[in-house]
Image: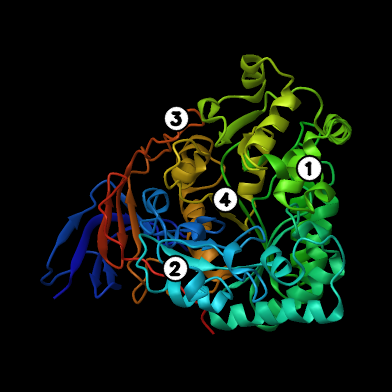
């Protein structure tokens, strides 16, 4: 007897091949038969007439690892059809914190924390994370920034030979414990202090295991081409498999169109035997910390309290203002405040409007938020061209991602947290015709499964995990907006985890059938 038969659906199996009509039979969390007119008894039947049946979506680049203990429902992921996420991105994983970190600086979350040394190594983190059922599967990368912080702190210098070996040993321990590879965050402290030779040496460890190195590269604006060239060099020299994270040309319109050149660079590298991919999210705004955007990297090489004190100094503030004016110009209407503990009344508003309401210069307002929030605060930055998004998305080695996490208790956030995958299907596939529906599904399923070696994921084939999405291809779309980010997707009828319905009409039913997925040999 089957546990479930999905009848009358149009199958888009993840390979990129044309769709076809068939039933899908599921037993013990696995797809056991895919064919027309499946006969036999079943505990349940789901009618997918007029709908497509696809593999569950795989988010190639997410940040939901911070919610594993605190918000394990992973609601924002599963409610847009994401059944697996590759987390620990942009050089910042939850572990390792390193054995020499004072206990009071190690995070403590809902019973997991200092006394259990959960965050000391990636192995200890994964061991404890596996005890908590998740609403959506999570895979981990080891962040290079976390490695560097654990060994060097935030010092702006080259590591000694001994320190380099310590970082490599921590990465090796993490991969052997189940992490899928390494992530780089080369605009963030302390990863931005690493020179190319350091990155190559550490990436070689990932290469030893045929693992992935994913990178938020050193620049996505004026020096985009140079930064892509550096990443290609790292992948070529290390022998690892590369993923260029959330690929885009950002900052100003002078950079728009450069992705045509960088995609050509990726194609040429692959033709030369370098295995490298990229991922992309379908929004024209990014999201990251105000400090990472408006403070020079050298300034961030100190504690938050020390940064606050320096930013209060008129001479230092004038120096930083000059740096910003050269980089960004005077107008900050492209900056929308997303998180601030000191100015919650302005969340979702543009910086020029906030400054006007406060009677301040726009940069003075940014500096005021930074100092009041102890260098915290984040914003959405409207610096991306939609034509560039389409160019990257059309590349045959481009995967779809959110670059987002779990909102938790936040009420304002980037809408990609709720709508990246429905938006890619609705706006870029159905409305704009950037790629066909089967090809878009491949970018969301089989391709990331292959890149990250998830052998039982990404295909509607017999023997594969019954993580599935069932949706209306004529209706699916995101509804979350930058000014109203709470809206759920439309047209997403069902999401299944391990053969059980966990989402209906984009609403999670509370079942947590996901887990922490470890690296397969």
Disc 3 residue crowd, few under 14, some 14–19, many 20+, Cα 10 Å: some
Mark 4 and mark 2: span between their CA atoms?
A: 26 Å
Q: Are marks 4 and 3 in contact (CB under 8 Å)?
A: no
For the residues carrying marks 4 and 2, which lies nearer the camera in this image? Answer: 2
Element at label 2: loop
Mark 1 Cα shell of 10 Å, populated few (<14), some (14-19), many (≥20): some
Q: Which residue is mark 2?
A: 112
State which tag comes first along the sequence, 4 or 1: 1
Q: Nearer the viewer, mark 2 or mark 1?
A: 2
Task: Give residue 128's quadrant in the image.
Answer: bottom left
Task: Identify the secondary structure beneath mark 4.
Answer: loop
Q: Is residue 341 above or below residue 191?
A: above
The disc placed on residue 40 is none
Depth check: give the residue in front, 380 or 345: 345
- Which of discs 1 and 3 lies nearer the camera? The answer is 3
Secondary structure found at label 1: loop
Q: Which mark is residue 484?
A: 3
Q: Which residue is label 4 attached to?
A: 403
Work out whether residue 153 or residue 469 is closer to the camera in this orientation and state it. 153
| Gap between marks 4 and 1 measured at Cα | 21 Å
- Say which residue label 1 marks: 258
Vertical relation: 257 (above or below) 34 = above
Residue 272 shows in the view = no
| Residue at 27% from the left image edge and 55% from the top image edge | 510
The answer to which image quadrant residue 158 occupies is: bottom right
Question: CA–CA distance between discs 3 and 2?
Answer: 33 Å
Please tell me whether mark 3 or mark 2 is closer to you in this view: 2
First reached walking from the N terminus: tag 2 or tag 1: 2
Real-space Cα separation, disc 4 to disc 3, in angstroms: 19 Å
Quadrant in which the C terminus appears: bottom right
The quadrant of the rendering that contains the N terminus is bottom left
**Could you tell me residue 326's position as x and y percent?**
87, 32
């Amino acid at each position: 007897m089957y546990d479930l038969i999905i009848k009358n659906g149009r199958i888009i199996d993840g390979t990129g091949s044309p769709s076809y009509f068939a039933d899908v039979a599921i037993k013990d969390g696995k797809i056991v038969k895919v064919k027309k007119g499946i006969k036999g008894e079943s505990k349940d039947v789901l009618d997918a007439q007029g709908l497509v049946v696809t593999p569950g979506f795989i988010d190639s680049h997410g940040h939901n690892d911070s919610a594993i203990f605190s918000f394990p429902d992973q609601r924002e992921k599963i409610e847009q059809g994401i059944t697996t996420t590759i987390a620990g991105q942009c050089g910042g994983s939850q572990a390792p914190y390193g054995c020499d970190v004072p206990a009071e600086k190690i995070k403590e979350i809902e019973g997991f924390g200092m006394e259990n040394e959960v965050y000391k190594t990636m192995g200890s983190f994964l061991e404890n994370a596996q005890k908590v059922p998740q609403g959506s599967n999570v895979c981990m990368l080891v962040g290079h920034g976390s490695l560097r912080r654990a060994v060097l702190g935030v010092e702006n210098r080259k590591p000694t030979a001994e320190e380099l070996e310590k970082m490599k040993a921590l990465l090796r321990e993490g991969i052997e414990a189940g992490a899928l590879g390494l992530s780089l965050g080369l605009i963030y402290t302390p990863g931005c202090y690493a020179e190319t030779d350091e990155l190559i040496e550490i990436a070689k460890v990932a290469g030893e295991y045929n693992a992935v190195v994913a990178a938020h590269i050193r620049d996505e604006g004026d020096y985009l081409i140079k930064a892509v060239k550096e990443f290609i060099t790292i992948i070529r020299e290390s022998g690892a498999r590369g993923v260029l994270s959330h690929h885009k040309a950002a900052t100003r319109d002078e950079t728009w169109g450069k992705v045509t050149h960088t995609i050509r660079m990726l194609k040429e590298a692959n033709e030369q035997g370098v295995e490298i991919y990229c991922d992309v999210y379908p929004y024209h705004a990014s999201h990251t910390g105000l400090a990472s955007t408006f403070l020079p990297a050298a300034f961030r090489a100190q504690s938050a309290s020390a940064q606050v004190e320096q930013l209060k100094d008129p001479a230092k503030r004038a120096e930083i203002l000059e740096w910003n004016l050269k980089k960004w110009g005077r107008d900050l209407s492209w900056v929308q405040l997303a998180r601030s503990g000191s100015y919650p009344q302005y969340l979702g508003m543009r910086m020029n409007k906030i400054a006007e309401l406060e009677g301040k210069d726009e940069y003075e307002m940014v500096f005021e938020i930074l100092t009041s929030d102890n260098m915290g605060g984040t914003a959405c930055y409207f610096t991306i061209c939609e034509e560039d998004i389409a160019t990257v998305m059309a590349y045959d080695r481009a995967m779809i991602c959110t670059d987002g996490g779990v909102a938790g208790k936040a009420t304002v956030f980037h809408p990609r947290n709720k709508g990246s995958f429905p938006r890619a299907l609705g706006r870029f596939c159905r409305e704009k015709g950037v790629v066909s529906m089967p090809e878009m599904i491949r970018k969301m399923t089989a391709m990331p499964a292959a890149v990250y070696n998830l052998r039982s994921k990404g295909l509607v084939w017999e023997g594969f995990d019954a993580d599935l999405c069932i949706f209306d291809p004529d209706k699916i779309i995101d509804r979350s907006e930058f000014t109203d980010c709470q809206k759920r997707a439309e047209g997403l009828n069902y999401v299944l985890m391990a053969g059980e319905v966990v989402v209906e009409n984009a609403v999670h039913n509370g079942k947590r059938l996901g887990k922490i997925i470890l690296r397969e040999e």
